[in-house]
Image (cartoon, rainbow, N blue to C red):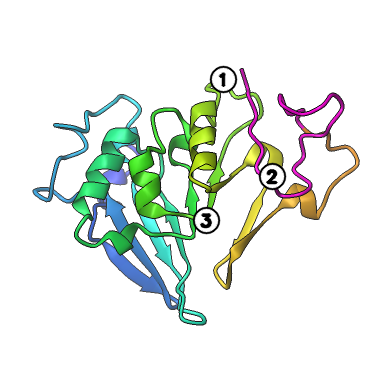
Amino acid sequence: RRLGLASAPWRDCHAGQAWTWDVVRFSVLYPLAEGAGPAPGSGSSPRTDSGNAYSCVLRIEAAARGGHAAVALLPGDIERAQERDMVWHHAASPGVLKADLMLAPHHGSNTSSTRLLLEAVGPRWAVAQTGYRNRFGHPALPVQRRYQEMQIALRNTVDCGAAHWRSDQPQALACERQQRPRYWHHGVASANGPAGESGINKTNRLLILDEG
């Protein structure tokens, strides 16, 4: 109230909200609207102090090119309960969840990226936004293995730096550290690689790092 937010022109996000901007379609898929299913703060999606259960899940669809409209899915910090509720809610329209690129929910936490969600979304690429040797151990090793088993290319911003993806070339994703390497940038050593091998993903192949 002291900041004047009570009169600010904003409202909570909920599934069903959508708008178009410069031929790009934006759609909110979660949280579910009141009365449309389990609320983030009750039932199968218990509210937590972090507020992760209330993350807005945003779907971004570009204009179709060559018969394909590229889609990016930004799921915020939702966890397994919210992933399940969202998938079940959109079960009648499974194509709504399909995407070419997805940010790994909750930075690749072990509480997210369930097989149910990954099967529903079926992304070619996933990006885990993480910090080097972060205290949470993101992305969790079991989660990395799950992406690998499902043949989803997971990129970690620790190794990739900025990830470049374009809706007109949805099959490709480039890493800033590969495109513009600096001599003072030293890679994170892979736990599974030979001694002295740089952890920078020069070949754009999947890296699984054990942060301990």
Q: Position of residue 12 (x, y in %)?
A: 26, 49
Location of residue 45 with respect to 168 vertically, above or below: above
Which-is-in-front pick, marks 3 and 1? 3
Residue range highlighted in magenta: 188-212
Q: Is residue 71 left or right of residue 181?
A: left
Name the spot of residue 138 as percent of width and height, x first.
54, 29
Q: Quarter-wise, where is residue 91 in the image?
A: bottom left
Q: Which residue is mark 2?
A: 160
Which amino acid type is shown beneath numbered disc 3? Arg
The residue lying at 87 percent from left, 45 percent from top is 182
Q: Residue at the far bottom: name it.
A: 66
**Callout 2: 10 Å neighbours few (<14), some, many (20+)?**
many
Give x and y (percent) for residue 22: 45, 77
How far apart marks 2 and 1 lie (CA) works out to 19 Å
Q: Nearer the viewer, residue 102 or 9?
A: 102
| Residue closest to the eye, 20 or 129 | 129
Quadrant in the rendering for residue 5 = top left
